[in-house]
DNA sequence: CTGAAAGCGCTTACAG
DNA sequence: CTGAAAGCGCTTACAG
């Protein structure tokens, strides 16, 4: 009997299975297509119809199956998040953000680690073997120009996050590093500080120069002279912060505030100050940059600049997905640059200058 | 003409599209089924056939489409990684590991943040709305007994990572915290230290008691008396480490080594020592636990215990996927517990006792 | 604005 | 050990 044939179907949906578009369509009394249109927020659905469908979706607790969507849509988009420094304090938040973006845009996200000494060619081969369409680069890899050039040449879509200098061939999501450093320095000046030390970041990261430029511009805007002795090199490590702090605090006319280009170096400044029995913030105000876990791990907690890291990587993921899909539809898809807002976070490590 | 009808097909594979099983099958002169069997490492394929297929796969650069696999396999498995503390130093590595596991096992991974004050019921509702099958819990949530109970009752599969006390209803991946703390303490004793301070971890995390137990057992094994004054409470924060270190170093007969239950507290010990002009490790050896970024951010770098965090979360993800799928096939799938190895990492913060 | 049918790339259930 | 066909849950291309 036909009935029996029906029962011997190849695969059956398990009893407690999740509702599908077909279930929703049946419940709402419309076609699958219409359900699909409602899900995808297309405009050409009558309000009444749309409402019926939405009611059915809510009633059944329907959630679209992402595997089916991307398979049907021909939307396959494979994205690799390539990171260089595993102990980067950014990474947790960065990953969370890109994962969210991947979820929202049906992107297949893979994590790749660029091992020390591995050539750009080797990593490219690895990505190509995995059929990667696009690469997401957190710092410090977002500044690896040679790597980016080789990816671009291979036709991969690229997004640089938090770079100071976006490549012509890549999308980029940044905050205004220069403006942020300016704001922090201005904050210190507003607190009455006149001798403000600055610890620069790694010269290989393009944001470092921007942060320094922001510091210098704020000094000029505040009518303060630029004292070269107050600017010390650093490379974003705690250890380099230690060295810079020693030098700064050895100065005859020592600063009353020190602005370090990241939190790790700022934490080192606090440590050196304590070793010398200088109280923070009473004797010395200290501020950092990034608002990583380090900022709230030390005592006092650090005044710092917060970047919306998760939001930046989420957005970068979205830009990449858009680019890959646009290209696949034969549309030109040039790189896009977006700038997000930073936030100045005031905590215990800075106070008005005490005379 | 039939030819024309062919050309008017609904959707066409774009020209430069990736090879599919059909392409591989054609190239190898076998059926799709056989290709599928080779990909899935099933045994019932003749060596000669298998080799032909593998050659074709290599030649075409074939990579399976995960969306298609999970759709066809009815293998849909939605996993939520629920975290409580965003600044957890674990998280980056933890995320990377679970992402890898998700990739390997065709699991759809979602990240959920448990907001402060949110009820277990609220988060459960959120997960259910997203049709989540299983929940992965990094510390400290891996010890949230009430939460776990409510998830278990709702029928979710659960995995606790790095808990000291696995629930009967959940899978768990741990290292031997007791053994690790024993090893670290024994290492200090082996270095000649006799007065070894200990800073305990957060009492709400079950691993804390295990670490303390390991410390105490090593003392007994080394024939050393247990001095209650040498054991100070802490809660895993830098700040609590500061307080505990002050107390310990105020002792008339002060310790020559301090073992803190995590790296943040150990870093605080280093800071307090420096403030008092005690050199680490010359005047005081210090060791931590976890090998987080903090361990190598301070100077000297910390001797510590490394947990294979990424591997732990990868494995937990796998256990969860297996459980969900076994259940779906109607098989009983009890929780599984796995213990991985830790590593003692010797760095600059510990040296033999100098008399 | 709405729908019936084909197809995305795989695996499952059967059959040989 | 191997294969032909159906089906997973969606979206696309057409047609009305």
Image (cartoon, coloured by chain):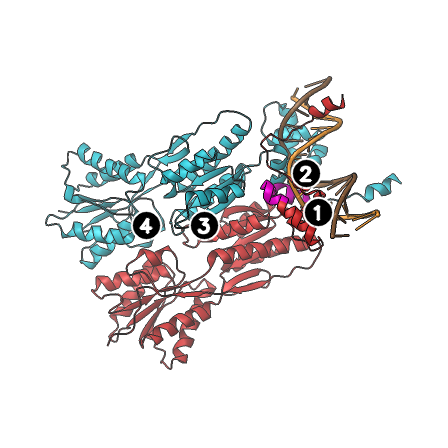
Chain colours: A red, B cyan, C brown, D orange
Give the quadrant of residue A197.
Answer: bottom left
Query: Residue tagged by mark 3?
Result: A116
Callout 1: chain: A
Q: Distance of mark 2 from mark 4, alpha carbons? A: 47 Å
Which chain letter goes with mark 2? B
Q: Nearer the viewer, mark 1 or mark 2?
A: 1
Percent across and percent down for residue A284 are 27, 69
Q: CA distance from mark 3 to mark 4?
A: 20 Å
| Residue B148 vertical placement versus A132 (above, below) | above
Residue wearing tag 1: A34
Do pointers 3 and 4 mark residues of a single chain? no
What residue did someone put label 4 on?
Answer: B295
Which contiguous range is marked in magenta?
A56-72
* Nearer mark to the viewer, of 1 and 4: 1
- Point out the frontmost of discs 3 and 4: 4
Q: Residue at x 29, y 65 (%)?
A: A245
The picture places residue A295, in percent across and down from the top left corner, at 35, 59
User: How far is mark 1 from mark 3, CA to CA?
Assistant: 52 Å
Where, by quadrant of the figure, is residue B204 drawn? top left
Q: What SS does tag 4 mark?
A: helix
């Amino acid at each position: 009997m036909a009935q029996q044939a029906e029962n011997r179907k190849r695969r059956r949906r398990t009893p407690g299975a999740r509702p599908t578009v077909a279930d929703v369509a049946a419940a709402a009394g419309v076609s699958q297509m219409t359900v699909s249109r409602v899900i995808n927020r297309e405009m050409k659905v009558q309000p009444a119809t749309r409402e019926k469908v939405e009611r059915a979706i809510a009633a059944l607790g329907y959630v679209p199956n992402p595997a089916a969507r991307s398979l049907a849509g021909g939307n396959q988009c494979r994205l690799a998040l390539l990171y260089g420094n595993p102990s980067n304090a950014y990474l947790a938040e960065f990953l969370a953000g890109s994962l969210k973006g991947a979820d929202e845009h049906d992107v297949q996200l893979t994590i790749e680690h660029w091992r020390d000494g591995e050539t750009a060619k080797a990593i490219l081969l690895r990505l190509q073997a995995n059929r990667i369409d696009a690469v997401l680069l957190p710092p410090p890899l977002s500044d690896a120009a040679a790597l980016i050039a080789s990816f671009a040449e291979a036709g991969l879509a690229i997004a640089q996050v938090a770079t100071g200098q976006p490549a012509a061939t890549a999308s980029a999501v940044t905050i205004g590093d220069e403006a942020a450093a300016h704001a922090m320095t201005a904050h210190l000046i507003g607190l009455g500080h006149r001798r403000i030390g600055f610890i620069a970041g790694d010269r290989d990261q393009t944001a470092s120069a921007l942060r320094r430029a922001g510091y210098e511009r704020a000094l000029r805007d505040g009518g303060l002279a630029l004292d070269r002795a107050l600017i010390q090199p650093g490379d974003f490590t705690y250890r380099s912060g230690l060295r810079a702090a020693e030098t700064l605090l050895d100065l005859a006319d020592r600063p009353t505030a020190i602005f370090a280009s990241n939190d790790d170096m700022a934490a080192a400044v606090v440590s050196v100050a304590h070793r010398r029995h200088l109280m923070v913030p009473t004797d010395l105000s200290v501020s950092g940059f990034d608002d990583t876990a380090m900022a709230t791990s030390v005592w006092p907690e650090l005044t710092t600049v917060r970047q919306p890291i998760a939001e930046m990587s989420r957005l970068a993921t979205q830009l990449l997905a858009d680019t890959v899909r646009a290209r696949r539809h034969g549309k030109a898809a040039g790189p896009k640059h977006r700038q997000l807002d930073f936030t100045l976070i005031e905590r215990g490590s800075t106070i008005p200058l005490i005379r």
